[in-house]
Image (spheres, rainbow, N blue to C red):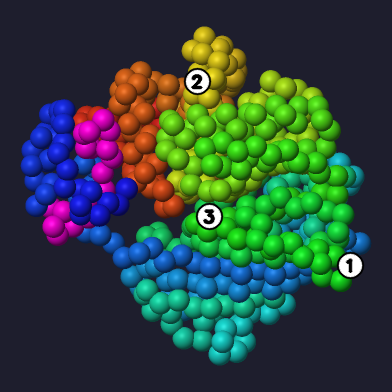
Amino acid sequence: MRIPLFKAIRKTKNIKHKKSIIAAVLILVVIFAGISIYQKSGSYYVVFDEIVPQVQRLNEYNIDVTFYEEEKIIEGKEKVTYVNKTKENIDSIYFHIYPNVFKTEKTAPFSEEEMDLAYMDGFEPGYINIKSVKSSEGDLSYLVLGKGNSILKVNLNEKLEAGDEKVLYIEFMVKIPPAYGRFGRGKKTINFGNWYPIAAVLDDSGWNLEPYYPVGDPFYSEVSNYRVAITMPPNYVVASTGDLIKKENIEADYEWTFEANKVRDFAMIASDKFKVLEENVDGINIRSYYFDDNSAELALNAAKDAIKIFNEAFGKYPYKHFSVAASDFFIGGMEYPKLVFIDQALYVNKEFLEYVIVHETAHQWWYGVVGNDEVEEAWLDESLTEYSTLLYYENKYGKEDKQKIYNKMIVEGYNKYKDNVKKDEESILRHLQEFNNNREYHALVYCKGAMFFEFLRQELGDEMFFDVLKVYYDKYKYKNATTEDFIKICEIVSDRDLKSMFNQWLTGVGE
């Protein structure tokens, strides 16, 4: 949390250990630097002393597309304002173009046993065609490459210097496949997940150009600002990451215009069968998009109660709305900023429906606001999200019910896997490519990962454990965190060396 000087100069109380010394120095330090702190009951945890950085500059996307119902395509253009946030000059910019992996059965992001579920009506290709890439100076050359042709490399006419920005104009056409996944169409919904050219992350390791793996959620992106307009037939209702700015007639269709700031992706879902329920909690509009009345209110209440519980446990949800959308989606649930897809088949199973909705809602904190590399370090958001789901049950129904859910969903899930593998195959912290299948991924990242957070809570105690989560959320809001960052937060708040414990749980080293 960044604070102005007048807020930093306060009287502190009940400071333990070395905090009294830090408090004495605080006034002198703030004269020259900004302090990232976490305030609790009149006391301050000083987490980092650092010079106030420049205002964060974000990439901007302005996307304008039209959906053609008969052809099942979307066509349009994207204006990208890309900021070079590194200290080096660059001569090219890379984008993920995920729809191309749906072009063949071989590259489609599903395991062999999932193909029949993903393509219930038979396989048809989906893809994205890049028609042109331009800058204000004219045409730019580009290459489509990578596994499944899922990477777009744009060559710049001149180097983009550190700190400068470049505006690109991309024209494209997307064919939507009959896939019941993040991206695709079913009998009731059209799922626009990972559907447009999105800039790859350039960090200290270089460009992150990982393919669309069939295991986990193989995504890694930066927070950006979006303005998206989509023209749809008049009978469709559109739910999206963005706040609806306007909806207007364009000949026989409607153009929906959305805006979303400080989000790390932009998803939509459209249906000509949606009904909508809406309520407000803590100043946030919660919307449930559904088909049948059965469980529609349960879906709304689960999201509403989860938002309220997590607001108190971790820190305030920073956006104006959150939407839960029933969808043709065989995988169960999928998180996007301010919007989650929920398999419509779950609406007949009230217990599991609630669990999945709460899990995807927790992702709004862990993935949505605090990001991470979900390819290299999937545990960081997924394990914490799964444990956050348990916290919902503890807060809403009591510790006894939480323990029952923990034993049934977490411990049993892990034990079924553990009984059939070698001990050295239990590493949680690993690259997605190193998991043999989604069953192994779920047992380790979801189940064993949640068990680790239960252990960490017992080791630190409730007060310190929740202090850790609040500080972590505050420090890395709108940023990408790493495992090392999380360990550092835990060690600073607890004033303990925890590396050995983390290594034992995450990698098995030291067991």
Q: Earlier in the sequence, mark 3 or mark 2?
A: 3
Label drawn at residue 252: 1
As rendered, which of 25 and 402 lies closer to the eye?
25
Looking at the rendering, which quadrant does residue 211 occupy? bottom right
- The amino acid pointed to by label 2 is Asn
Disc 2 element:
helix
> Which residue is drawn at the image coordinates 26% and 30% (left, top)?
41
Q: Nearer the viewer, mark 2 or mark 1?
A: 1
Residue marked by disc 3: 263
Foreground of the two, 112 or 88: 88
Q: Earlier in the sequence, mark 2 or mark 1?
A: 1
Q: Position of residue 504 (x, y in %)?
A: 36, 27
Q: If the image is split into quadrants, where does the C terminus sit?
A: top left
Q: CA distance from mark 2 to mark 1?
A: 49 Å
Q: Amino acid at mark 1?
A: Ala
What percent of the width, then of the height, locates residue 131?
72, 77
Assess whether residue 37 is covered by the magenta stretch: yes
Residue 337 place in picture, x, y as percent: 58, 48
For the residues labelled 3 and 1, the Cα–Cα distance comes to 32 Å
Describe the element under mark 1 as helix, strand or loop. Answer: loop
Tell which of 258 and 21 is nearer to you.
258
Judge whether residue 25 can be spotted in this image: yes
Q: Nearer the viewer, residue 423 or 234?
A: 234
* Residue topped by disc 2: 395
Name which residue lies at 13% across and 46% down: 26
Q: Secondary structure at mark 3?
A: strand
